[in-house]
Image (cartoon, grey):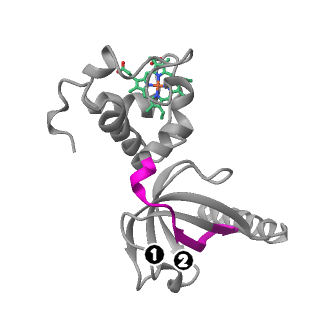
């Protein structure tokens, strides 16, 4: 029994030390800016679930619930909206301090492609020095799931994008490659939406 008591005292002291050293640090809210797509909104609770891109210095791309500093911030936000938002981090507390709808999702896949893929695969998928063409050969035969995997995990000479892009963006860029860049070229392209 005694042993347990001693252990408890040690634990309490450790917790107190941790708590106080936390306080003595200068705590100022840090602000981060991020982009993502709304997966769900609970306006009454002031909670929004966002599939977001990497937030530099804070976290990698993932789907996560965020609390809004003020419920009113979420008034105009709906499911599937592409959004830009700002987070403040105060100690462990992270909340949304600003959020707005970003440009429409239509051009999204095209933008992701232009920003991340074109330098290797070419604006029209024609291929460049560092990347193979996407409009001929193998690239036309692979199913969508292979494309998604390739983009998430990368390849021998292609970087992985799972950390850099959100899953929604990966889906959007793959859809763009398949439906726009490879339009009319693929043999299996019958039931594409
Ligand atoms: C640094 C250059 C580079 C970048 C950036 C890049 N790729 Fe690649 N990609 C390659 C190379 C090289 C290959 C050939 C195979 C390998 O290395 O895995 C490839 C292969 C592919 C394939 C497989 C084609 C097949 O034969 O089935 C797809 C699909 C693809 N890339 C899509 C993309 C998309 C979409 C992006 C942007 C999100 C992208 N790549 C960004 C270099 C790149």
The residue that disc 1 covers is 47
Residue 86 image point, x, y percent: 62, 67
85 w.r.t. 166: above or below: below
Please name the residue shown 49% across and 61% down the image.
103
- Quadrant of the image occupied by residue 78: bottom left
Q: In the visual, does 35 lie left or right of 185?
A: right
Task: Kindly identify which numbered label has been placed on residue 68.
Answer: 2
Q: How many marks?
A: 2
Q: Quadrant of the N terminus?
A: bottom right
Task: Kindly identify which numbered label has been placed on residue 116.
Answer: none
Q: Residues within 10 Å of mark 2 (few under 14, many from 20)?
A: many
Please name the residue shown 85% across and 70% down the image.
24
Q: Nearer the viewer, residue 179 or 96?
A: 179
- Quadrant of the image occupied by residue 28: bottom right
Which stretch appears magenta?
87-108
Q: Nearer the viewer, residue 99 or 25?
A: 99
């Amino acid at each position: 029994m005694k042993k347990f008591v001693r252990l408890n005292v040690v634990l309490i002291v450790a917790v107190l030390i941790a708590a106080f050293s936390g306080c003595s640090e200068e705590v100022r809210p840090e602000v981060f800016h991020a982009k993502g797509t709304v997966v769900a909104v609970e306006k009454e609770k002031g909670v929004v679930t966002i599939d977001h891109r990497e937030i530099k210095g804070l976290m990698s791309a993932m789907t996560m619930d965020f609390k809004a500093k003020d419920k009113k911030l979420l008034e105009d936000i709906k499911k599937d909206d592409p959004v830009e938002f700002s987070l403040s981090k105060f100690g462990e507390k992270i909340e949304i301090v600003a959020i707005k709808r970003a440009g429409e999702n239509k051009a999204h896949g095209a933008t992701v492609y232009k920003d991340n893929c074109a330098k290797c695969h070419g604006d029209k998928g024609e291929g460049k020095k560092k990347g193979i063409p996407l409009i001929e050969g193998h690239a036309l035969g692979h199913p969508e799931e292979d494309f998604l995997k390739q983009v998430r995990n990368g390849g021998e000479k292609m970087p992985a994008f799972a950390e850099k892009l959100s899953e929604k963006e990966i889906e959007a860029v793959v859809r763009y490659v398949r439906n726009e860049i490879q339009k009319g070229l693929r043999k299996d392209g019958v039931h594409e939406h």
